[in-house]
Image (spheres, rainbow, N blue to C red):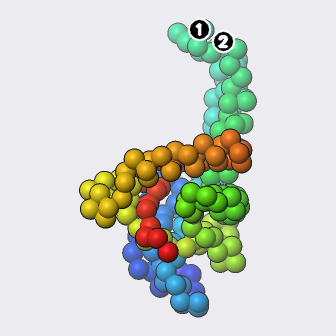
Amino acid sequence: GMVPEIPGYQWIRPLGAGGFADVFLCRQELPSREVAVKVRRHHVREDMLRDIQLMRRAADLLNLTGVPMMGSVMDGMDMDAVIDEFDRTVREEIDFGAEARNLQRFGSFVGKDDGITCPRVYREYSGDTVLVMEFVRGVSVEDVGSLRACGYDLKELGDRIAGSYMRQMVEEGFYHADPHSANLIVRPAL
């Protein structure tokens, strides 16, 4: 997609792409630092609202006509409730203000005793469609060879990550909705 013009940022390279947004490595001019900038794609909100409306129309039609051949699979299913939950989840996913608040909450408790951290959010440069975060360099947990070559104990790293996820859920009531390995890096000790 097109890289948006944001004054004060030098675009270095794309970092990744998802269904709703693209992420870029940028240099912020003042203050000078590398940041990750997540930019929501154009028309995502409009497309989402249209899709939800189509789902609601389909549910209304199913309520009137039933679903041939589905029988017990649909019995007792409240399609309106399913669509409402999907609507709520997707709206939160595309709201970078909500994502920034979640990152800040996560950062306020994670790593108290296990060295786990999360990128700092720069709320003053972020909004509903752009999220500016600290760019963190390190080794992906998917790169097992590099982790071993650097001398990391993989069992200890795994235990630390699993323990952190459990504390997040049990002690903080925080559920990380996207805990796959691509979202985890091991950064050098500071």
Horizontal side of 187 relative to 44 (left or right) equals left
79, above or below 85, in the image: above
- Name the residue rendered at 69%, 37% in the picture: 85
- Name the residue rendered at 48%, 66% in the picture: 23
Q: Which residue is mark 1?
A: 71
- Name the residue rendered at 44%, 52% in the picture: 157
Q: Which kind of residue does numbered mark 2 sit on?
A: Asp
Could you tell me which secondary element the residue under label 2 belongs to? loop
| The quarter of the displayed image where residue 28 is located | bottom right
| The quarter of the displayed image where residue 130 is located | bottom right
User: Does residue 109 appear anywhere in the picture?
Assistant: yes
Q: Position of residue 53 (x, y in %)?
A: 67, 40
Please name whichever residue, 140 or 12, is drawn nearer the observer in this view of the structure: 140
Number of numbered markers: 2
Q: Are marks 2 and 1 in contact (CB under 8 Å)?
A: yes
Q: What numbered label is drawn on residue 148?
A: none
Horizontal side of 179 relative to 62 (left or right) equals left
Q: Position of residue 129 (x, y in %)?
A: 63, 66
Q: Which kind of residue does numbered mark 1 sit on?
A: Gly
Q: Position of residue 127 (x, y in %)?
A: 68, 70
105, above or below 32, in the image: above
Could you tell me which secondary element the residue under label 1 belongs to? helix
Q: Quadrant of the N terminus?
A: bottom left
- Name the residue rendered at 31%, 54% in the picture: 144
Horizontal side of 143 relative to 58 (left or right) equals left
* C-alpha gap between disc 2 and disc 1: 7 Å
Q: What numbered label is drawn on residue 75?
A: 2
- Label 2 neighbourhood size at 10 Å, few (<14), some (14-19), many (20+)? few
Horizontal side of 64 relative to 188 (left or right) equals right
